[in-house]
Amino acid sequence: MTEILADKTSQFVHLSDWDDATLLDVLGHARKMKEEHFRKPVASGKMLGLIFLNPSLRTRISFETAAVHLGAGTSIIQPGQGTWTFETQTGVIMDGDRTEHLKEAVQVISRYVDVIGVRAFAGMKSLDEDMEDQLLRDIVSYATVPVINMESAREHPCQALADGLTMLERLDGKPKDKKFVLSWAPHPKPLPMAVPNSALEMAARLGMEVTLACPPEMTLPDTVLDKIRAHASRNGSQLHVEQDQQAAFRDADIIYGKSWAAPIVYTDPAAEEKLRTDTCRNWTITADLMSATRKAAFMHCLPVRRNVVVSDAVLDSADAIHIDQAENRLHVQKAVLMKLMRLMS
Ligand code: CP
């Protein structure tokens, strides 16, 4: 068996794996490494296995680059693209076209690498299963090395860390009491809730006043809202749910645009599509909406649909910081890798 360089308790699967102090510590480390243009082979000889069950641009390249900057190697595993196709369900008769079960694959990968990254999006078939993050939990249970969530059904914690670093930069390190607005936006495809869930949690854990702006049909599940309320309350702030987009934008410091599917996607996909693409089509984020803010920064995790989610004018404005946000994936992930490999002082 390969030497295990960090125990599984140091995994980064959900934001809740790390307390506020740890998150701030990792963010501080990332900021320092960004300032220092940190490139040292501190992880020389170590290996990352990055399993992508779904496509990616930023996550893949930023992890590969982070590994190079730390002197580590990477192996990209994309089932069906140079790797055997994976069965993900448990207890199935594997007489179809899927060649290998994740149970064997992840155990084997664990024998070769020091850390495993996993991207496993929501199945969008069962809300309970997606909110439980069942597929990711299965993968974590098969792994014998630390796992990093590279976006699962329920959360995108690496994106949230990059969001946190970007907001700290924009707000001169003083996010407390600043107004953070997550605004729903239209989209041609039903997207999962991982990014909105994690972005809200990060803002609440930074002590920001958090507003969720969305049409009534698009509100997030109670389990998500209750968790955000608890984090906000613990940090002396509140979660506000606002169905009037103009009112929500008033005096905001940060506008985070994002589309997600209405929860009825699980029971009535046709009705959900009509809501998302027709009834609520006027929720596109525009310069007019932004003019009501306190010269807010515009954020988006990317990829973004121009002139559907947000207008060209907003995305091309000086206050759009989505490219910095994407860059910060690199810096926070370097810090995450160093923490999991116990290379952070
Ligand atoms: N934001 C994000 O995770 O981008 P990718 O899907 O391109 O990795």
Image (cartoon, rainbow, N blue to C red):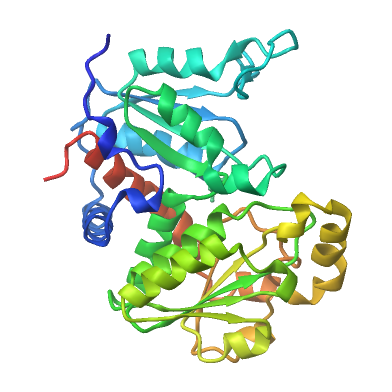
Residue 212's spot in the image, x, y percent?
57, 75
Residue found at x 58% / y 40%: 56
Residue 101's spot in the image, x, y percent?
57, 15
Q: Left of 156 or right of it: where is 302?
A: right
Most foreground residue, 312 or 191? 191
Quarter of the picture containing the N terminus is: top left
Q: Left of 37 or right of it: where is 186?
A: right
Residue 335's spot in the image, x, y percent?
27, 46
Residue 147 vs 291, above or below: the answer is above
Residue 111's spot in the image, x, y percent?
34, 13
Q: In which quarter of the image is residue 162?
A: bottom left
Residue found at x 40% / y 42%: 13
Camera sees residue 319: no
Residue 88 vs 131, above or below: the answer is above
Quarter of the picture containing the C terminus is: top left
Residue 97 vs 277, above or below: the answer is above
Most foreground residue, 302 or 266? 266
Q: In which quarter of the image is residue 166?
A: bottom left
Q: Left of 325 or right of it: where is 174?
A: left
Camera sees residue 223: yes
Residue found at x 47% / y 54%: 326
Q: Left of 186 or right of it: where is 268?
A: right
Residue 236 vs 277, above or below: the answer is below
Residue found at x 64% / y 16%: 85
Count numbered badges in the picture: 0
